[in-house]
Amino acid sequence: MSDIVTMDKINRLMSYLGIDSYIVPHYNLPLPEEASGSNFRPEKIFRLYRNGTMSYQGYGYGATMKNIQIDNIVPSERYLTRVYLHMVGEARRRAKHRAKFGGIPNLEHLILKFNGIDFIDGETVVA
């Protein structure tokens, strides 16, 4: 991935996929400051929204740890990159599925270009 990940690219991918938010697969990423310390919960969900902010929902076990939700977290570059990589994979799968029976050469590229997400085409292998 040679380009820098921007919220504009992520928003265009969200538009193509028809979603308003995306749950971030957060495994092996450092926790944001808002999810550390007294706000830490063993079960957590990070959700990225189109406006560029992230929310954190933490769930605890037993009566000692109450559930928590924190909004308007500024995501780090690593979180944006993780979201971008997962969404690019989903967009590629969707374009490939739509082009499967089209019968037009490079239809997958045309679908990506028509939807304004042809910036991922350089990373796509065209047979």
Image: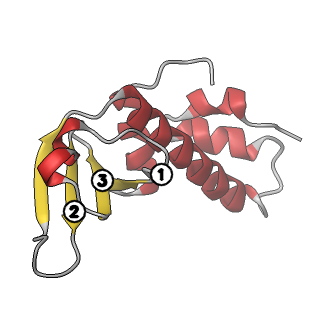
Q: How is the image coloured?
A: secondary structure
Identify which residue is drawn at 66% across, 39% down: 110
Q: Are marks 1 and 3 in contact (CB under 8 Å)?
A: no
* Residue behind mark 1: 27
Q: Position of residue 115 (x, y in %)?
A: 50, 41
Q: Nearer the viewer, residue 2 or 64?
A: 64
Quarter assignment of residue 73: top left
Real-space Cα distance between discs 1 and 2? 14 Å
**Circle 2 residue:** 58
- Give the CA separation, mark 1 to mark 3: 11 Å
Label 2 neighbour load within 10 Å: few <14, some 14-19, many 20+? many
Pointer 3 local density, CA inside 10 Å: few below 14, some 14–19, many at least 20: many
- Earlier in the chain: of badge 3 and badge 2, it is 3
Figure quadrant of the N terminus: top right
According to the image, label 3 marks what residue? 46
From the top left corner, tell me how far across and down residue 102 is, in percent: 76, 58
Q: Residue at x 61, y 32 (%)?
A: 120
Which sits earlier in the primary sequence, circle 1 or circle 2?
Answer: 1
Q: Quadrant of the C terminus?
A: top right
